[in-house]
Amino acid sequence: MATETVKSTKASAKSKSAAKAQAGETEGVKAAPAAAAKKTAKAKTVEVAANAPSYAEIAQLAERYWAERGWQDGYAEQDWMRAERELMGASS
């Protein structure tokens, strides 16, 4: 299974202090949970299914749906979502 790493952005020290002050936290009272959350927020891993349909496969099926409607405009997003659903269901 392929994985993709997504890095989160860090908040500045000034904004962190302001958030603590607004929440009414004092130094050391909630340091342990905040430190644990900070470690887990550094890098998150998103799993992508290896058998997920490609962009080209979805586009091809969506175009077929468009053709079946007689090339009528205004339904591109619905065609895309329908094609994606159908291909994801077929690959499961």
Image: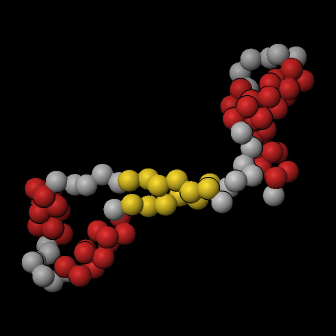
Quadrant showing the N terminus: bottom right
Find residue 74 and report its horizontal and vertical position in percent: 71, 21
Find residue 19 and report its horizontal and vertical position in percent: 17, 62
* Residue in the foreground of this view, choosing between 62 and 77: 62
Of all residues shown, which one is farthest toward the front? 2
* Residue in the foreground of this view, choosing between 24 and 51: 51
Q: How is the image coloured?
A: secondary structure
Task: Reply above or below: 38 against 46.
Answer: below
Task: Reply above or below: 59 against 74.
Answer: below
* Residue in the foreground of this view, choosing between 58 and 81: 58
Task: Reply above or below: 79 against 46.
Answer: above
Task: Reply above or below: 18 against 60.
Answer: below
Residue at the spot x=38%, y=53% of the render?
7
The answer to whether residue 79 of the structure is visible from this angle is no
Residue at the spot x=80%, y=28% of the render?
60
Residue at the spot x=35%, y=64% of the render?
41
Quadrant showing the C terminus: bottom right
Find residue 38 and report its horizontal and vertical position in percent: 29, 68
Q: Quadrant of residue 26?
A: bottom left
Horizontally, residue 19 falls left or right of residue 49, namely left
Horizontally, residue 38 falls left or right of residue 83, namely left
Q: Quadrant of residue 77?
A: top right
Count of numbered marks: 0
Find residue 69 and report its horizontal and vertical position in percent: 87, 22
The answer to whether residue 34 of the structure is visible from this angle is yes
Residue at the spot x=34%, y=62% of the render?
42
* Residue in the foreground of this view, choosing between 71 and 92: 92
